[in-house]
Amino acid sequence: MTPVSVASAVRRTAYEPIFGALPSANGTRFRIWSPDAARVQLILRRDRLDELAVEMAPSVGRGFWEATVADAHTGDRYAYAVDGSRPYPDPASRFQPDGVHEWSAIVDPSAFAWTDADWTGLDPRRAVIYELHVGTFTPEGTFRGAIDKLSHLRDLGVTAIELMPVADFAGRRNWGYDGVALFAPSRAYGEPDDLRAFVDAAHRFGLGVLIDVVYNHLGPEGAYLPAISPRFLTAKHQTPWGDAVNLDDEDSDGVRRLIGDNALHWIHEYHADGLRLDATHSLVDASACHIVAELAESVHRAAEPPPLLYAEDHRNLAHMVEAASGGGWDLDGVWADDFHHVMRRLLGGGEHGYFADYRGDAFELADTLRRGWLYTGQQSAHHGAPRGTDPARVAMRRMVICLENHDQIGNRAFGDRPEHSIDPPAWRAAVTVLLTAPMTPLIFMGEEWCATTPFLFFTDFEPELGRQVAEGRRREFQGFPEFAAPGAAERIPDPQAYATFAASRLHWEECHTPPHSRILALHRALLRLRHEHPALQADDAFECWAVAPDDSTVIFMREQPDAHDRVLVVARLRGAETVAVPALAEPGWTVLLTTEDEPFTDAPHPPRIDPNGAVEFSRPGAIVFGIGL
């Protein structure tokens, strides 16, 4: 995508939804896709009492059915009956006030009074992403409750909030990836206008909003879309969830239109600044134009400046983030997991699963910083095949890196965060590397103050399904040594238990007292440096200068294209050692920050810096040097 200025306010293109109930001055238009149906009825319930059945007629393409009802109003409930079936909720419902099994409600997305006319959009070069789960972010667990914490996020220095999936799900709580009503914000978090109010308020605070969307599968309870549109899934491909979403089989055009319409509806109806696509490696598509490339094109055309599109994908595929003019998919970024995995091993993480592919030393970390990801085609023991491609033509900013995210915590048996078991000086050094690296950093909610709360996997399915999910969860971990003994897996929290969900809620009072307030101060200081100095922002360069003088120390340099302003980061991640840093022999370097500065620790052990360029660490730590700043 061609770089654009974000100096002017966002201008959205014209948009008319393809799917769902759309109120207008002439009544409400209802449209559904059911390509195998011989007859579809709209059943309308006014004031929840007066029920009206309306025959729908074939519409805008194969399998589409449509009806317009003059006196159908906002708040009325409706459902669809296909070939005499029982009434089903609308797969494109904008709201399920009584749950995903019940009738849909008509919503007028144009009724909200937006105040963000001056919002200028999200600059990908300045993006610092903050990932949060609405239900556990605040005590209220709602969109409105999250508004009260926007000042904290602004003061922290992040620029974009990534909302974990908000599409409605079965039950009152879910960690997000079991959504079934793809267009409907979960009633557990509030009403649609509450989400709009959150985005509107975020823009007032100078924060962009990204919405995490899941197109690779549907949740196991309440997914009525395949009942209405059996062609939504195909046995042609298999995924971890069973039959794949139909992207390249017969009648896949309707599926692709629904997915594209869903993506645009978040941009237009909720003023989202972009999307994060979940697990795109499970979107199996042999079409001439992959669905992800198709989405990138349509999302980028939806407004000016263009909304952003990120993807979670473990394959390290350069073409996903290369320009469309060169045959790429033109995504604005992709989750680059190698940074997390190397750091986790280096700082004392596990050795099982995908971690077996990493030594966990500073040499791997330097390679990752230098290129953006580590695996560029090498054999992966975990995958049993080569993994990755050469990112030589990929701008560093298009890699999204983290020390923790919902997957890397929630997929652990006890939902524990890495900082719960890592020595604080080493953790401060790791945070410094994350927030000064040339890639786009992501922070998971509470990470900024080393929250004591875990982030567990939680659900609220009907009892029998819930029991199966809990048993499956425990079986999943029996291959790990700590759960190999009989009965050991019973210690893993029951995802169905309310206590599992409640334990994952942040304790906001922590961030005001040491040691939490000190690590929060470090995050704020590093992000302030990143904001103030272009040499520390996400980089359009294709590589970064980085070296590892030993297996525990990494040194890397950031600079602006004219090289007048430079930043040098020296990070010791394990042990105590004197490190030679020849670059410091050049005159003019000043210390911008060390992790041993008094605001960041109550017992400073400042590193000693020799005039000839040697740095003596008495324990793990990091120093940020600047020249020309």
Image (spheres, helix red, strand yellow):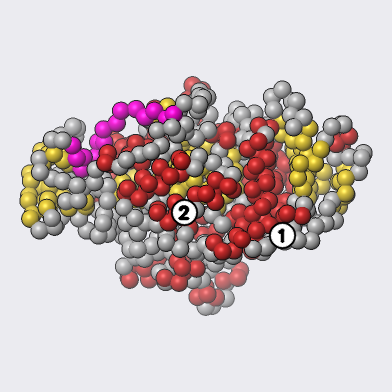
When asked about the image quadrant of residue 543, the answer is: top right
| Residue 455 on image: x %, y % | 52, 62
Q: Which residues are the magenta region?
A: 9-24
Q: Can you see residue 518?
A: yes
Q: Which residue is mark 2?
A: 148
Query: Residue visible at 88% across and 49% down?
Result: 608
For the residue marked with disc 1, what is the amino acid?
Pro
For the residue marked with disc 2, what is the amino acid?
Asp
Q: Closer to us: mark 2 or mark 1?
A: 2
Query: Residue visible at 56% across and 57% down?
Result: 446
Quadrant of the rendering where the C terminus is positioned = top right
| Residue 594 on image: x %, y % | 77, 48
Q: Can you see residue 33?
A: no
Taking the image as shown, residue 519 lies to the left or right of residue 129, namely right
Query: Residue visible at 72% across and 55% down?
Result: 600
Query: Residue visible at 64% across and 48% down?
Result: 524
Taking the image as shown, residue 366 lies to the left or right of residue 11, namely right
| Residue 255 on image: x %, y % | 29, 40
Q: Which mark is residue 624?
A: none
In magenta stretch: residue 12: yes
Foreground: 369 or 502?
502
Foreground: 106 or 278?
106
| Residue 37 on image: x %, y % | 14, 44
Q: Which mark is residue 424?
A: 1
Estimate how packed mark 2 is, as few (under 14), some (14 to 19) or many (20 or more) residues with alpha carbons within 10 Å: few
Tag 1's secondary structure? helix
Taking the image as shown, residue 450 lies to the left or right of residue 245, namely right
Are the residues at dot 2 and dot 1 in contact (C-beta closer than 8 Å)? no
